[in-house]
Amino acid sequence: MEETPPHCLSRLPDNSALKQQELPAHQLYFTATRVLSAFFTMGIFCLCMGIILIVSARSTQEIEINYTRTCANCAKLRETASNFDKECTCSIPFYLSEKMMGNVYMYYKLHGFHQNLYRYIQSRSNRQLMGKDVKAVEDCSPFKTSNSNTPIVPCGAIANSMFNDTIILSYNINSSAQIKVPMLKSGLTWWTDKYIKFQNPSFKNLADEFRGTTKPPNWPNPIYELDEKDPRNNGFLNEDFIVWMPGAAFPTFKKLYGRLNQTHHFKEGLPAGNYSFNITYNFPVTRFQGEKSVVLSTLTWCGGNSLFLGLAYTVTGAVTWLASFAMMAIHTMLKSKKRSFFHQ
Amino acid sequence: MALCAKKRPPEEERRARANDREYNEKFQYASNCIKTSKYNILTFLPVNLFEQFQEVANTYFLFLLILQLIPQISSLSWFTTIVPLVLVLTITAVKDATDDYFRHKSDNQVNNRQSQVLINGILQQEQWMNVCVGDIIKLENNQFVAADLLLLSSSEPHGLCYIETAELDGETNMKVRQAIPITSELGDISKLAKFDGEVICEPPNNKLDKFSGTLYWKEDKFPLSNQNMLLRGCVLRNTEWCFGLVIFAGPDTKLMQNSGRTKFKRTSIDRLMNTLVLWIFGFLVCMGVILAIGNAIWEHEVGTRFQVYLPWDEAVDSAFFSGFLSFWSYIIILNTVVPISLYVSVEVIRLGHSYFINWDKKMFCMKKRTPAEARTTTLNEELGQVEYIFSDKTGTLTQNIMVFNKCSIYGRSYGDVFDVLGHKAELGEKPEPVDFSFNPLADKKFLFWDPSLLEAVKIGDPHTHEFFRLLSLCHTVMSEEKNEGELYYKAQSPDEGALVTAARNFGFVFRSRTPKTITVHEMGTAITYQLLAILDFNNIRKRMSVIVRNPEGKIRLYCKGADTILLDRLHHSTQELLNTTMDHLNEYAGEGLRTLVLAYRDLDEEYYEEWAERRLQASLAQDSREDRLASIYEEVENNMMLLGATAIEDKLQQGVPETIALLTLANIKIWVLTGDKQETAVNIGYSCKMLTDDMTEVFIVTGHTVLEVREELRKAREKMMDSSRSVGNGFTYQEKLSSSKLTSDLEAVAGEYALVINGHSLAHALEADMELEFLETACACKAVICCRVTPLQKAQVVELVKKYKKAVTLAIGDGANDVSMIKTAHIGVGISGQEGIQAVLASDYSFSQFKFLQRLLLVHGRWSYLRMCKFLCYFFYKNFAFTMVHFWFGFFCGFSAQTVYDQYFITLYNIVYTSLPVLAMGVFDQDVPEQRSMEYPKLYEPGQLNLLFNKREFFICIAQGIYTSVLMFFIPYGVFAEATRDDGTQLADYQSFAVTVATSLVIVVSVQIGLDTGYWTAINHFFIWGSLAVYFAILFAMHSNGLFDMFPNQFRFVGNAQNTLAQPTVWLTIVLTTVVCIMPVVAFRFLRLNLKPDLSDTVRYTQLVRKKQKAQHRCMRRVGRTGSRRSGYAFSHQEGFGELIMSGKNMRLSSLALSSFTTRSSSSWIESLRRKKSDSASSPSGGADKPLKG
């Protein structure tokens, strides 16, 4: 009972650097040289980056034509859902004062369309879209099945609301002759989308594969009739469909519609001149007070002609420089004061 | 073990019959098995979970989890909450389980201790847990008492037995217990086996000093009292063996009944954190409301029209209801502002800090082989905020070892240590101790350094001989000689022991005593003195004398006592000697030694006879016997011849003065609360430099009535005010001239005061109407010493400071009498390695040396506080930066509770991507090396002033977080609104945006932690770079084709990382965001360093302090020599042993010689002893829990 606990040295803590809190370490000091040089470098970097970005962005060209109001009659027609089978086209002429060099991309742009609503984003079935099980519609509410309980393909709110205007760009070679600008409907999507995320059940006879399903309520045609000419662009692999499916982050967004096929007249891009968009107006936007436009644009290494990033960098760089000068001034002032204090 | 605790109806009385287990079993008394553990294997899970969900935070997260299971409002998958929740619960459960395992282990260890139980007439070894009520057990010397026993008989005469109750009440002096006479004869086993008495007594209770019961035996009744009881936790001392009857066992024992559940302590940071969390909840609700209103408006204005594309949910019938649902959805999404991982991380960091304390080699005591131990892991950062330390004296500041250090004999001082060259040696370079080998009876442990004293003895200097003769005769020590030459002294106080032992080593060996004689071996020859009278010590007399007749027949009175008392009673012829001795006394007192003056007086036969006759008369007197005796004693103790003085060192623990000085510099106020006497306490105050002669005044409050105390306190305050008014100006002026401008005027004006208050005055001072006055006065003083305080008063004082000062208090002590104060204070520290472990068990931290306190506070505490504050700042910042992005996004996504990030990112952000770097900072960060925090104690101040994390700092963090979130959202927004990839394909989709924001967030917070980390160890590097690497690894894994193939609906972000992060635009966005978020922080810190440099300020200031400190060190030595303090008579023992000796009650004599003592007189002796004890009500043993009245 009286045995004292064995007094062995095992109770002596280890003499390791970790346990004695003596790990080798370096400390961060905000010394004037370091901070100021970091600031100056950062300032230079930001300014340079800003200038480069602005210059690059300025080198691109972009034309945006809002056709919500221009095609007012069509818009009005589309406001009533029952008119869905009445075709409505509208042509918008425009003049390209400067030729657009290189690859020209055509986008459609929607204003005020919320592709980023929680329930909207959720409303899709990746299982179905990757062709594994076309009847997998669990996540697709409120567009899971039709009234007769047949699963919708492609199901979900995103697919149902797919943008379905047809836009054809025509070039007026002269006052009378109009030729259609050749647009490529390929390479509009990410590789991963086209080859992993979206897959048809099989390439042969899509209609069979989709038997027992029904088209989304807003669609005029079933999924396997999206592009009957090109089986590689049909079904879930349809480029327009794939472009539509990822939800845009903000209510105003543009999505790639086609890219210029650089042949014949258009080898170097779009020459200056008169053009017109021939639009089959299907997609109603006025119902939700939205707008839509069509955009033609060329690109550089940093994307489109948005100046935001360039300006942001320039401003940051400028502010950083100003700040570093201010800091330097304060520092030198205080240093001399301090010196006089210590040497008194 | 599981059988230990059984619920029984409350007992009304207890019956226990000796040696009759069957009879006792009827009552189903608790067995002697104790159980402090909480769970067993089966109950662990349910009980632990139940306890954990009593935590508000856990319940909150459970509530969130339930919310998430409602599909209409769930905007996040359930796993975003359940993963962290399960993690938290598991970690806590594992910790609880380990704690409980150790409790099981210690229970087992205690329960399996062996004791000897009398079963069926034979002594058998039994485990403690198998001891039952009604058993008779045998205890041997130095054994712990296994249960509450009724003492039956013992090896000592008259059934006396000595116990030490340190574990129960912290008093280290021995106490006497006595068996009732009828059982004290039951000395051998055969008699005991036949004993079948029955005890009927009170039910189990927690009153340590009360017991009432009756023993029924042989048709007779015998009353029992606490004087007959041995309580569990006591240790048997100086008694070879004793037998006891078990009355209370296990949980019913008074010790266990007293060990209440320890209060759960929270730190001030904890409380602040809880307030802030509440505020954040409020903020969260506000955001939820704003967004919900937004949602209702949006649904009303836009959503209704958008129904073609997205019809409302079936459950939603109006925009208002949609808004209501969206409120809950946003609560779920935004709940990450108070992440569950906050609580876990805080616990982990504290655990880490606790381990650092446990591992600290510099807090390991080599002598006792005990490391420091953080027994509570939840209080560490509060160690960095302590403002008041309440310290016990005995065993904490002092070692409770008395050492005969110096003496002055007939005008010559002995005991200074000289080195070879004849200079006074400094500490640590002591020469060889004096060799006592000439004396076979010498105590080997006794060390003395001045050989000249021994020479004086050897040449036979008569004064020196007389000096030691006095020491060997005038005392109440009992001797015991087991074998020839093996002497053991049973001293009632360590002071006496030290003196008698000193005499023994110098050749005046006290060998044995009878009631009428004392045998002393004087330089080898046995001389027996006839003991005529013992004039015992008491508080008023402050001296004791013996009157002996030497073999030659001469009667001499030997007296030792406090200098103040004794010097007045000396013969006038000794004036010159008196002056020299006074000088010596001053010198000793200045060194903090406890001094006694020794004197003798020769009495002639007739005078003695006449005096003895009067004494006898007086002692027989019925009324005012005490007073009469006192005056008769006073008469004889007069005209004495001065012999010299002794100086006993109440050995301080190592490094106590230095520690106190350092802690004082760190602006920590130290109060000493001791049960010891005023003189002793003040003495220690001087020797550990709490009190100095430089102090303007030391106020001593000793009033016995409310009015007196109030008056004394008022006077003290007036004096302080006066001096600051009148002396103040000149003083400040001087101060300004001499030192520097940095000493604040207030401090300089206030001067240095100290307050000493007595227990009975304290009782009044702590009354409701005076406590504030007392506190004000006390807090204005530099040092406060409370003496003669009861354990309860200790707790009350701590409570008082806690209540009004709103300061963090720390109590440090070693004994059970400190338990209440240790439990009351914010932080309790127990000194381990002493015999009692009660204090350690109740404490939050324990180590074996007082001096480790400076390291605990100034190094560990400071770092803990710093780390915790930095951690909290960063944690709130990173979560606000993380979460507020959702809020901004709400304005762009129709307030539909769409998150910005992928749900996996939300799940993992707090537990994987950003947890380890901040943990590493929280565990390892250091701002200045540990040596600096000792050198510059002022570095401790930010903690006391709560500067590093308070509401202001919190708002700064929040603001920074919100600022970051704004940039984190709007910069990518600006870019992404128009962005396309360089091949024209999409970039502005939700998923790319999510990846970009998440990536820049992870990078920004990583850079920020890089800036915050002041001390980059390899571990920090590993965690920070590792976290970034893990982020990208997980990102790419989650966005990989393989996972998508398996779970297409769960991992929707396939291919996103590679597509997005391949774009220069995205990286430029991330870089810009990082630069814009971080640069202002760097600029701000740089400017603060330049404009308001707290650190350099501190350094400058502390350099000054260091200079001062050095000067002070020099001062200290000088002060030590010139001290004018005089110590009082420093015995800590109680009166009454003289009577005991003269009555012969505790003498081991043949029963024949004592036959004249009847049982009646013996009980009357006990009575008188007890009465005296209760008379001196100010003694802490008077009762632990009754407040003292004047």
Image: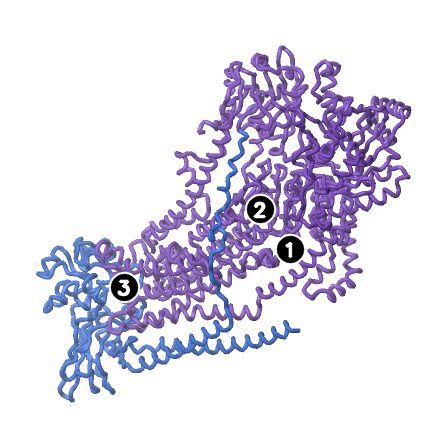
Chain colours: A blue, B purple
Q: CA distance from mark 3 to mark 2?
A: 53 Å
Name the residue rendered at 67%, 64% in the picture.
Answer: B742
Instruction: Report which quarter residue A121 is drawn in.
Output: bottom left
Q: Earlier in the sequence, mark 3 or mark 2?
A: 2
Residue B694 x, y percent position in the rendering:
75, 54
Q: Which residue is mark 1?
A: B667
- Whether residue B1146 is visible to the viewer of this picture, yes or no, is yes
Q: Amino acid under label 2?
A: Ile
Rate crowding at label 3 as few (under 14), some (14 to 19) or many (20 or more) other CA atoms within 10 Å.
many
**Element under disc 2:** strand
Do the residues bearing badges 2 and 1 touch, measured as CB atoms within 8 Å?
no
Mark 3 residue type: Asn
Q: Answer with mark 3 or mark 1, whichever residue precedes in sequence.
A: 1
| Label 3 residue SS | helix
What is the x, y in percent for residue A295? 25, 77
The residues bearing labels 2 and 1 have C-alpha atoms spaced at a distance of: 17 Å
Q: Residues within 10 Å of mark 1 (few under 14, many from 20)?
A: some
The residue under label 1 is which amino acid type? Asn
Q: Chain of mark 3?
A: B
Residue ID for mark 2: B827
Query: Label 3: which residue?
Result: B1056
- The one nearer the camera, B520 or B1087, is B520
State which tag comes first along the sequence, 2 or 1. Answer: 1
Q: Give yes or no for contact between labels 3 and 1 (Cβ–Cβ under 8 Å).
A: no
Please name whichever residue, B53 or A190, is drawn nearer the observer in this view of the structure: A190
Left or right of residue A170: residue B666? right
Vertical placement of A238 versus B838: above or below?
Answer: below
Q: Chain of mark 2?
A: B
Residue B690 can be seen in this image: no
Circle on res. B414: none
On the picture, is B710 further left or further right than A39? right
